[in-house]
Image (cartoon, helix red, strand yellow):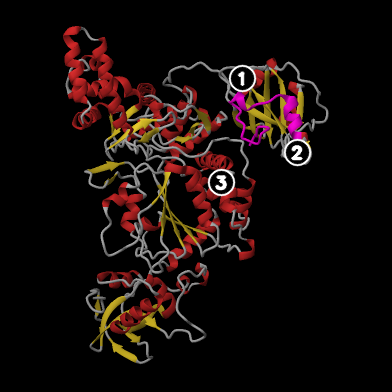
Amino acid sequence: MPFQTNGEPAKSADPSTWVSFEAAMSAWRAGGFDGIGYVFSEDDPYSGIDLDDCIVEGKLIPGAQAIVDAFATYSEISPSGNGVKMVGEGRKPENAGCKKYRVDEIPCVEVYDTERYFTITGQALPGTPRRLADCQTQLDALCQRLWPTKPRPAPRPGHEAGHHESVAMADRERRCVAYLGKCPDAISGQGGHDATLRAACECFRFGLDDDAVWRAMHWFNENKTGGEQWNEKELAHKIDDARTKVAEDGEFEVRLRHRESVPLRSDLERQAKQRTDVGNAARLLLQNGDKLRYSVGPGVWLIWDGKRWKADERKEIVGLCKDTALSILDEAKRADDTLRDDLLTWARASQKRERVTAMAALAEPDVAVGPDDLDANPWLFNCKNGTIDLRTGELRRHQPEDLITKLAPVEYDPDAPCPRFMAFLEEIFGGDQELIGFVQRWLGHCLTGDITEQYLMIFWGDGNNGKSVLLDTTMALMGEYAGTAAPELLVVKQQQEHPTGLADLMGKRLVLASESERGAELKLQLVKRLTGDDRIKARFMRRDFIEFDRTHKLILVTNNRPEVKEDSEAAWRRLRLVPFAVVILPQNRDRHLMSKLKREWPGILAWLVRGCLEWQRSGLGEPATVVAATEQYRGVANSLEAFIAERCTLGDGLCVKAGTLLEEYLDWCEREHRTPFKGRAWGDELKARGCLKSRLNGARHWVGIELHEPPDDGYDGFDPTSTITPSESKLAVQPRTPVKSVKSVKGSDGSSAGNSTELHGDADAGEVA
């Protein structure tokens, strides 16, 4: 992060925070700063080229050497020691971007000529000039190579399918294709037309040119249409329709009902001549309409504060209405004699409470916005110094037309470091880089309103392991984009949840749920709803029900893994267990860590944005640690599975009295604070494990299972927080094949139970009342 000489943060786009070279050198010599930086601006003729990680074993890789040789200008080794920065005279072409990934084995090439600073090390690259050369020709050639200018022809049938395979896709195009891979398939006769049109719209919203859109949609046509591809003419029509739709709707698709319903200024001016409540509402909108919206869902006014549409918690709308009423006095002063007295009378009447209230109420419909209008672009993330486009990682100015209501209390600087935070991650994850990368991609994904990843992440581990610090820091810097779920929202409880608990999720992108009670049962049907595609129905306190699209990602933070009463793929495909296995010892705990991390918020946000971009490129990429932890969790998640692992053996020729098995199971659940299966579910779960009901010697038995005595070597109950692996569990070697028939079975006490072929599939005996 750059600083001013007074210690305050500097900004590459704010000249008031810059100083002269002499002042910067003087401050550096006085101590307290690591070095100096140079800001590129519109007022100078210079450009900078940054080649990342291009020095390997002390030598430039060939691609970087070619660029350095071509520019023949001042070049120095970057602060990391692994990159090269060059500075020369020249301005970027208008079409040029800023970053290009993977250029001739160079991980990233960056080119800037304004609103960016370079840290100057003075460590010149050996064999390069010590002067700034005129590099305009070389700069034009490099930018044309990285961001080639091409004509924008409309897609034509006959374009060779698969042509994109021979073309190196730009980073944005790769991320777009990765995103399309997560979208629903476009099956003919099953909504395939609309799905393909939406996919083409997404290509344009990612900022792709026509050639890149054509390549991406060819990939979509080949991989996401279930084998029934659109022909070239049909695909071209869909791309043309998407181009038109995005151009008409703006940057993203959204139902902007309020833009259609806001009266024209001429209509407002005509209405404002009336001495009525309707006239006063028109006066209010004429004077303040550009900074007022009314949110229908929660029923609150929104005020544009220069950065976002903020909920009017201080009743500013009342003050604006009062000012509007007082402005009628000015109208009276300008009016002719025939109207002046009537306007003065109306001005005084308009200052009454009922007139002020009516003014606001009648203005509401004209500037109303629904839940689907606000924060509708899932790829925009609003922070203090602008709005980040998460498709590119670039920052742009705040814009009222984005209809953003949220603000993260942090400034975005893509180059800001966060060394203490990175050390913290190394510590809490034990140096597991795969796990750190996975968490970065997941939390980066949580910056967006995208819901293609349908998971409940369970961050699990005993206390003092860093999970709360990590999530509290992320939540704090995300600000209004993050929130907490209602207590016990995701676990079974006696009383039904209030619908306002679901309303709290509206518009959030990261939601934390906390549950530490041992034996709590996960509410799977609700988890499926809250991680799925369906719209959510809820209501705010004393308001009507509304429906809204999901934008949130859920993380359950817990010291005890909740019980999962369903062993189906439909349930477990949504659950991922992220273990926090490192316990920070008391002598190593930093009581001031949160405040230290707060100072690194800009760097942490940049880390999250990089994670978001990487997620778009390559997906979540679950590490082995998460896969193994989730599989082991599945093995012991429900109480019967754990009980069988501890107290039973499964297999042919085994049996146990139904009442005895049930009694032992209930006693075990009570000791272990586990939730027992009840009613028919008890029998269904046993049958799912290959057990059958049989009447033997007049008594009901379960066949295919046998009780054994609990271990007496210090056994004190099953620990649901144990970290045994699936290979260590008895379940891993116990058969689960159904019992076909029974001739002679042995009871748990070793005695013969007699011969019988009477097998019962009912579950009415031995059930929990």
The range drawn in magenta is 1-28
Q: Amino acid at mark 1?
A: Gln
In this picture, residue 702 sits left or right of residue 277: right
Location of the N terminus by quadrant is: top right
Location of the C terminus by quadrant is: bottom left
- Give the label on residue 144, or none: 1
Instruction: Determine the CA span between mark 2 and mark 3.
Output: 24 Å
Which of label 1 and label 2 is nearer to you?
2
- Give the label on residue 31, or none: 2
Q: Earlier in the sequence, mark 1 or mark 2?
A: 2
Q: Amino acid at mark 3?
A: Lys
At 47% across and 70% down in the image, what residue appears?
Answer: 732
In this picture, residue 729 sits left or right of residue 26: left
Is the residue under label 3 in contact with that under label 2 (CB below 8 Å)?
Answer: no
At 39% across and 45% down in the image, what residue appears?
Answer: 552
Question: Would you say residue 704 is visible in this rendering?
Answer: no
Q: Residue 509, located in which quarter of the rendered image?
A: top left
Report the label total.
3
Q: Residue 655, located in which quarter of the rendered image?
A: bottom left
At 51% across and 84% down in the image, what residue appears?
Answer: 714
